[in-house]
Amino acid sequence: MKMNRKIIAAGLMALVSAMSGFAAGSKDASGGANWPTGPVQMVVPAKAGGGTDIVGRIIAGELQKTQGKGFVIVNQASGGGSVAADMVRTAKEDGLTILFFHTSLLVNYHTGLYEQNPVTEFSLLSLMRVGGSYALAVGINSPYKTVADLVAAAKAKPGQVTLGVQLKSSTHFMAGLLMKDSGAQFKAVEAGSDADKLVTLQGGNIDAALINTPGCLQYAQAGKLRILATIAGTPNRDSAAPDIPSCAELGYKSTVFGLDFLVLGPKNISPEVVKKINAAFETVCKDPKVTEQLAKARFPIEFIPFDQSLAAFKEGDEKVGQTAKLLGIGK
C-alpha cells in the first residue's frame, strides 16, 4: 500500500525538527547550561601535596558536590607547567579539561620556558587572588637580624650574599624587585622547591631564601630559622603572620608581587561554558566551608568577579613581562 505523500512529507519534517532539537540540545549539553556533561579533568602543574595541589583538591572536592560530576585532579609537573598547559590548550573545547595553575605560567611565557601566550591562547575561566605571602628567611644562626642587615651585607659584598630562589620563577622575580629597590646585588641561586630551600637554609649552605610563608612559619616557630619579612601581592602584612613586617612596609615599595590562581581552558570555549564554569568556581570559593579549609591550609583566596578578572590577568601579565626584562631574563 502506498503511503500518502503528504503524510511522508509531514513525517520527514517532524524527523528533521526532532534531529535539530537533539543537535541543539547536544550543543547546549557540551557547554551551555548543562555543563559539565561528564567528569572534569583539572590539570595541576605540581606534584601531589604541594600548595597548588592542596588548593586545587579543596576546590575540586566541593565542585564535585555542587556540580554532581567527578572532578579529577591530574598532577603533571613536567616542564615547570608547560606540559600541563599544552594538555589543556589542545584539549576539546567542552570545558571538561581545565588548567588550575597560577601566575607562574606568565613567568614561564615571558622567560621563554613556554612558547604560548597565556593571555591570547587560552580562555580565562576564573581568577583568584592569593592572600598568602613568601617569607624572606635566614638560618637561626645567621648574623642577619633584619632585612636592612641582609641588604647592607649584599651592598658591601656585591654578588657574594646568596639568596635561594627557583630561577625564572616567582621567587626569582621577587628577588629582582628587592634588588631593584634596595640597590643590593644578591647572588640569586637555584635552590629548588620550598622543601629543598628549607633544608639548604638550615644547613647554612645559602645566606637567605624566599620560601612560601605557611611552610616556613612552623620552622620559625620551632626556632630552626628566622623570617625577616614577607613579600605578597599587597604591601600589607600577611594576616597569617601579623608580627612579621612586609618588605614594602620596610620601604622596599616595588616588592609587591603575589600569585593569582588561574583557571584556564582551551582558547575557543563558548562564552556560555565560560560563564557557567566561572559561576561554579565563584559559588565554591565563596562557600564558608571552603574558605575555612583554605584558611587552615594558609592559602586564603579572594575570588575576582568575572568582569574584572580579564583586566587583572592582563595587568599581571604586563608586570611579569616588565620584571623579566628588568632581571635580564625576558624574551
Image (spheres, helix red, strand yellow):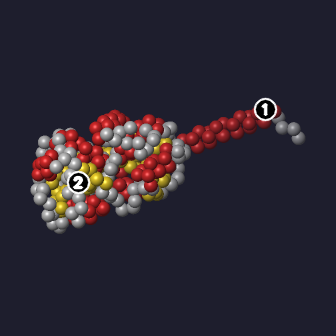
The three-letter amino acid code for the residue at tag 1 is Lys
Left or right of 278, for residue 289 = left
| Amino acid tagged 2 | Thr
| Kind of element beneath mark 2 | strand
Disc 2 residue crowd, few under 14, some 14–19, many 20+, Cα 10 Å: some
Q: Position of residue 124 (x, y in %)?
A: 41, 40
Looking at the picture, how far across and down is residue 103, in whole percent?
34, 45
Residue 21 image point, x, y percent: 62, 39
Residue sitting nearer the eye, 229 or 67: 229
Mark 1 vs mark 2: which is more N-terminal? 1
Q: Residue at x 23, y 54 (%)?
A: 162
- At 21% from the left and 52% from the top, the residue drawn is 160
Q: How many numbered discs? A: 2
How far across and down, in percent of the image, does residue 119 sit?
41, 37
Q: CA distance from mark 1 to mark 2?
A: 87 Å
Picture disc at residue 162: 2
Position of 160 compared to 89: left or right? left
Residue lying at the far right in this picture: please name it: 1
Q: Residues within 10 Å of mark 1 (few under 14, many from 20)?
A: few
The residue that appears at 31% across and 40% down in the rendered structure is 328
Between 49 and 192, the one nearer to me in the picture? 192
Residue at x 69%, y 37% (from the top left corner): 16
Q: In the rendered image of this protein, does residue 262 appear above or below residue 224?
A: above
Name the residue that disc number 1 marks.
6
